[in-house]
Image (spheres, coloured by chain):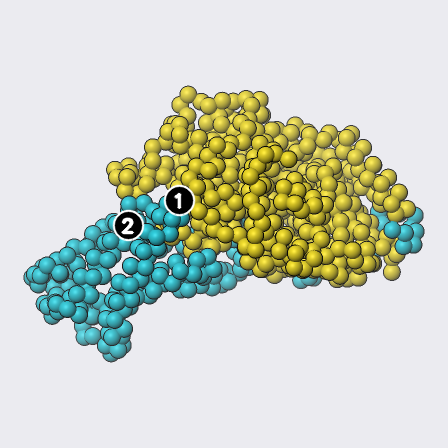
Amino acid sequence: MTPAPLRIPTMPAPRTRSGVAVRLGREVVLFASLFRGDKWAWIWSYLFHVSLLLVLIQHLRYVLVPVPQWLVLESPFGSYAAFVLLISLAGLLGRRLMIARVRFVTAPSDYLMLALLLVIASTGALMRFVDRANIVGFKAFIQGLMALQLKPLPLSPLILVHVASVAGLMVIFPFSKLMHAPGVFFSPTRNQVDSSRLEAQGAGDVTVGDAEERPPAHAPAMREGVR
Amino acid sequence: MSDIEVPVLQDYVPTPELHPGAMSHLKPFKASPEHQAALGFPGTLVDDWKEVAIRRLGELVDGSRALRVYLDSCVKCGACTDKCHYFLGTGDPRNMPVARQDLLRGVYRRYYTWVGRYLPWLVGATDLTEEVLNFWYSYYHQCSQCRRCSVFCPFGIDTAEVSMAAREILDSVGVGQKYCNEILGKVHKIGNNLGLPEPALRNTVEGLEEDVKEATGVDVRFPVDVVGAEVLLITPSADFFAEPHIDGLIGYAKVFHQAGISWTLSSQASEAANFAMFIGSREQMQKVAQRVRDAALALKVKRIVVGECGHAWRVAYAFWGTLIGPLDFLDPRYPRPQHICEVTEGLIARGALKLDMSANDDKVVTFHDSCNVARATRMGDRPGGQFTVPRSVIRSVCAHYVDMDPATIGDRTFCCGGGGGLLTDDLIELRVKGALPRLQALNAVVEDKKVTHMAAICAICKTQFSKVLPYYGLPREMVVSVHQLVGDAIVLGAKE
């Protein structure tokens, strides 16, 4: 672990570890800083992450046997989140292209990442709503993988593109901007406690002024109220 | 007044159109070989600068989790792009925080990441060339390390950390900035930024004693090197000679005098400022800070109090523990270190100071949150005390107080435009343009609320405002020290 010798939390920072947990929670769950910084970026990225989460939960159907009741209840949300996912990706791409400031700092990899996610989301949505995939066969394939057996993958162009793109995304994950996911937990401006100075002991009152009355050090001749 | 195209103050600060290269001509004066040698840096650009720079970058990344995480985590969301006062004032896209970071990030990616090595075009990785080095020198000296961008970043990426690292690399290859490095040399040699030797310091404070005596009839002392005093005051040396800083120093002296707290300055550590933070050198920062610990031990003081200086308070509050701590030889009943505003607020709360608010009745005052105080420190015992404590002090001595637009104060405060080692005349164009967002908010309360004065607790802010206010048609006398307001209101000699 790389050292972090200096205390650099962005103030006001919490004074306790539990306070830091709350601060990080607000960043991870609510994107609190981004909300203060850029409302449109917050809207698009928030919709994207929430709908991605719902869609990912939906994919647990391929993994869990039997499918639990809560997952059945989540299914409609997980299905229709696909449209939110597509719209938010379009929004993220749109602001990258339309806002000159953001376009200036965008690298080819940023566009390609959005393109890859659009491919994954649109092929997934097509298989769910237009050209229904053989999900029973696909579930058998996944169950086989989990038992370390190679079961036949139902062959359709959509499934192949979808699965290959997801596999590609997983491969580049550790080398890409997707590493921002763990990054926030290691960010000293957000995860450090405000505890760098030795605080006042005992009295509990940090600014208790002079501890005892004493005559002034240099005992100047006091003269009333002359300004 | 230089011939600069001064931005026009409007009702708000519009996000400017992009003007690529608008500020690429601006570079601070380079440090001479003598300035560099005094700090142990190469005097001129070394022959193998490229290898040295790349190696130093790797060392810095390995030595700082902050730098590593910040170079790795950016997703180019753009939330920071319109948050920098220098971008808002110049329109140069390389003054957008993320673009400024990218000047270093591109090189880091090229030499230290897998994708950058094999597919540089894909992730904006760039070779380290002479052109890139010049970009670094120009644009990393157009960052005041104010950290406003870090407030809005979803990952808390702090451009100041990147800018400090870049300056450290530049120094290590022999390209230093004259302003900071010359000043650091003076601190090592003489003990303060001004190069004010002990006799001159004593002479200066004796003059102040005479001035106060003449104005008030009371003997208020400004002690130097008094062994056994309770408080060691560490204050920026601008407080000894510059306006409006001096009036703040007089204010501190009146507070100590009235409260009966014995205090002293140290001729060895007659400087709170620590410009080593600006150049990103932890080693230099430790050396400069060590003088304070040594002085406190030599003078056998029980408390260390820091005067009105923004980055000095950051170094004291946040870094002293790492650099020279723990300060466990000091009196545990007080915060170690303590800010002068905390001292004054405590005394006022206890009724230890008799105040006559009418002294400031001719003023309508607002307060400028200095970046390093606002975003890197605390006062009092609750988060956010750095905002409430100074305001509480001002309200105790001023009947008429108003705040500027909430979007421009507190942790969202706009930099004065002169911080981070940029307070030098060779960068005046940047300083004038960078002051735009703060002065727009000030001008709004001048017009709507009849504000006459802006109080500040940072020596750099005070100097910067005194210099740039006239460019915008505002009187330079508007800016005052918080402790000038306090000092004017203290009724001397009226002990309860």
Give left or right: position of A216 versus B179: right
What hue represents chain A?
cyan
**Res B292 seen here:** no
From the top left corner, tell me how far across and down residue B357 is, in percent. Answer: 80, 59
Q: Which chain is disc 2 placed on? A: A
**Res A126 seen here:** yes
Question: Which dot, 2 or 1, sits closer to the camera?
Answer: 2
Point out which mark residue B71 bears.
1
In terms of image quadrants, where is residue B39?
top right
* Residue at x-position 78% and y-position 29%: B199
Give the distance between the C-alpha atoms of the residues marked 2 and 1, in whole angstroms.
Answer: 19 Å
From the top left corner, tell me how far across and down residue B386 is, in percent. Answer: 62, 56
Q: Secondary structure at mark 2?
A: helix
Query: Disc 1 residue type?
Result: Leu
Q: Nearer the viewer, residue B232 or B156?
A: B156
Query: Disc 2 residue type?
Result: Tyr
Give left or right: position of B12 versus A179: right
What hue represents chain B?
yellow
From the top left corner, tell me how far across and down residue A76 is, in percent. Answer: 24, 75
**Residue at the spot of label 2:** A111
* Residue at x-position 43% and y-position 44%: B18
In the image, residue A128 above or below residue B128: below
Marks 2 and 1 on same chain: no
Give left or right: position of A211 versus B16: right
Does the residue at mark 2 contact the one at mark 1 (Cβ under 8 Å)? no
Q: Nearer the viewer, residue B327 or A123?
A: A123
